[in-house]
Image (spheres, rainbow, N blue to C red):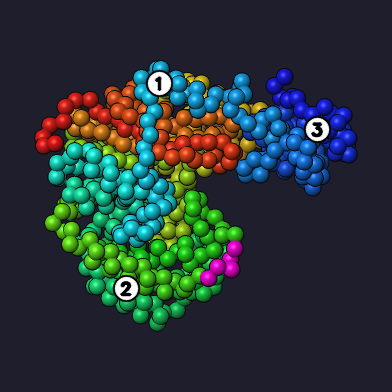
């Protein structure tokens, strides 16, 4: 019976454990109720009304005899729920792939080239402001090379991030256009696509900033409550002086100096950002002083500008990057030949949280209210204010029939667990896909006939429910007029909820029907 999974014979289990049958029965019942979602020690302690130490000890003993398993994020599940695939109450990836092939007539292929952004950390220009949630420059270069575009064609990235697509498009001779809602990323994209910067002159300007900083007193700290925990006193002293010595924003050179300063923030802290902002496990690693890191960043910028200088005759026109919400921007109709982007993943990154240091230290946010206001305009993630999900509690208006099956499963699993990080998780997922509809529509209008939209996107496991994000976006595209050209699996991933659960990242290529005009 669902909720009361069979296990080892209870007498044998109790004898092996030497623990109270009442405690075992209570934990058995609690884990049966939480099912595939599992529960933390604290949640179980609340359910069975015992202290957390007692529960942790019992779980450890149950684990030794194979009755329970510990999953990601400190979750415990009864052993019958340790593997989701094959359970009668779980719809897995293979089921959705089969349905996609049958209903939509597209078989999944394979993309074998580089896809993750890690390699960008070593590449000229791309390394100026690491953006860990992007894709590789090599991937973009490959898509551009195979697209058959004429020189001067327009390439769009509606979720431009720090400009990987735009840098590669301009270097290849195309007109690069992008939008991005996160102000520090917009700044980085504008600087990284301004190839006309004079490297030696920039480096000299940076030396003047350092001279002013050394003469200054330490400045005020940003509003973030954990600032003193995030940085050592020496780092805070130098960072505040550097920040206050920067020239006024506005010119390409001043913007580049701000990017160099922003690049020092994470390396000067006790934090990491891979993939989410968090504290490093060890604080014993040597942290170079911010002054030294700033100087090194400027040296790399000079080196990279000199390296790409000989390509000047191949560059496209200056890139255009707008700080704008991709859901509401109106790109000119029929103005785009190719769009390449990676939207936020369903229930993925809270970009405001992950880049709050940049927002605060660079002056784009002056208080938590600014962060909250920006978060409310993001494509939905699970940190979205509840007021932003209220109208999405009803699953009947979801943008694809598959979602009308998936969203109730999420809602039921959350209700079954009784204690989850938010009880409107199905509404968050609903809002996420609804948020991407106007983006897909806007890009469709902007594309010329025959133009393509290339999306890098992954699937997810949420509240014990599998969500095929790549296939859903492909299907949503067809309902808006696109033709699905291909869906190619690029790499395997692992769920944050369950490290044993395999996920994927795919390249979804949608095409606006019609014949492309102009040169091939």
- Residue 5 on image: x %, y %: 73, 25
Q: Is residue 500 left or right of residue 6?
A: left
Task: Quickly name the residue at label 3.
Answer: 26
For residue 101, the mark is 1
Give the residue at x 26% y 66%.
253
For residue 32, the mark is none
Residue 405 in the image: above or below residue 249:
above
Give the residue at x 55% y 68%.
285
Query: Earlier along the polypeptide chain: callout 2 or callout 1?
Result: 1
Task: Quickly name the residue at label 2.
Answer: 206
Tell me if mark 3 has few (under 14), some (14-19) or many (20+) residues whose alpha carbon lies within 10 angstroms of its own.
some
Q: Is residue 220 left or right of residue 445?
A: right
Quadrant assignment, res 155: top left
Residue 111 in the image: above or below residue 212:
above
Q: Provide the secondary structure element on which disc 2 rests.
A: helix
Q: What span is in magenta?
A: 282-286
């Amino acid at each position: 019976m669902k909720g009361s999974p069979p296990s080892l014979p209870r007498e044998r289990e109790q004898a092996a454990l030497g623990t109270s049958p009442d405690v075992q029965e209570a934990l058995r019942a609690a884990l049966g109720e939480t099912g595939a979602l599992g529960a933390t020690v604290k949640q179980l302690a609340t359910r069975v009304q015992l202290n957390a130490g007692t529960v942790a000890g019992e779980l450890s003993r149950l684990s030794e005899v194979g009755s329970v398993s510990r999953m990601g994020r400190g979750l415990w599940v009864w052993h019958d729920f340790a593997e989701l695939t094959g359970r009668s109450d779980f719809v897995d990836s293979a089921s959705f792939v089969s349905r996609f092939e049958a209903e939509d007539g597209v078989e999944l292929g394979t993309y074998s080239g580089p896809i993750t952004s890690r390699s960008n950390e070593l590449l000229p220009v791309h390394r100026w402001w690491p953006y860990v949630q992007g894709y590789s420059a090599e991937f973009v270069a490959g898509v551009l090379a195979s697209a058959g575009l004429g020189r001067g064609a327009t390439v769009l990235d509606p979720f431009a991030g720090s400009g990987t697509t735009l840098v590669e498009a301009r270097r290849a001779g195309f007109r690069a256009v992008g939008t991005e809602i996160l102000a520090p990323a917009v700044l980085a994209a504008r600087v990284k696509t301004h190839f006309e910067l004079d490297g030696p002159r920039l480096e000299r300007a940076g030396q003047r900033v350092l001279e002013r900083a050394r003469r200054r007193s330490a400045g005020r700290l940003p509003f973030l409550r954990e600032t003193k925990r995030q940085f050592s006193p020496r780092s805070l002293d130098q960072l505040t002086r550097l920040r206050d010595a920067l020239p006024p924003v506005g010119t390409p050179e001043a913007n580049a100096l701000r990017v160099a300063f922003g690049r020092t923030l994470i390396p000067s802290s006790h934090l990491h950002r891979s993939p989410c902002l968090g504290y490093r496990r060890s604080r014993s690693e040597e942290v170079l002083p911010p002054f030294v890191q700033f100087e090194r960043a400027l040296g790399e910028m000079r080196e990279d500008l000199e390296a790409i200088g000989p390509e000047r005759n191949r560059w496209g026109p200056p890139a255009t990057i707008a700080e704008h919400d991709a859901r509401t921007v109106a790109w000119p109709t029929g103005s785009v030949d190719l769009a390449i982007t990676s939207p936020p993943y369903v229930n993925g990154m809270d970009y405001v949280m992950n880049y709050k240091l940049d927002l605060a230290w660079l002056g784009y946010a002056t208080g938590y209210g600014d962060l909250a206001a920006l978060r409310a305009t993001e494509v939905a993630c699970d940190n979205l204010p509840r007021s932003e999900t209220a109208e999405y509690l009803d699953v009947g208006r979801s943008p694809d029939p598959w979602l009308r099956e998936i969203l109730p499963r999420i809602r039921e699993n959350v209700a079954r667990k009784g204690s989850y990080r938010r009880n409107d998780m199905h509404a968050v997922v609903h809002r996420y896909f609804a948020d991407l509809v106007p983006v897909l529509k806007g890009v469709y209008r902007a594309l010329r006939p025959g133009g393509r939209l290339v999306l890098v996107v992954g699937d997810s496991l949420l509240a014990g429910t599998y969500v095929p994000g790549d296939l859903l976006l492909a299907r949503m595209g067809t309902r808006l007029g696109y033709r699905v050209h291909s869906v190619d699996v690029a790499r395997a991933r692992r769920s944050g909820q369950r490290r044993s659960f395999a996920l994927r990242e795919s390249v979804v290529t949608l095409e606006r029907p019609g014949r492309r005009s102009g040169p091939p």
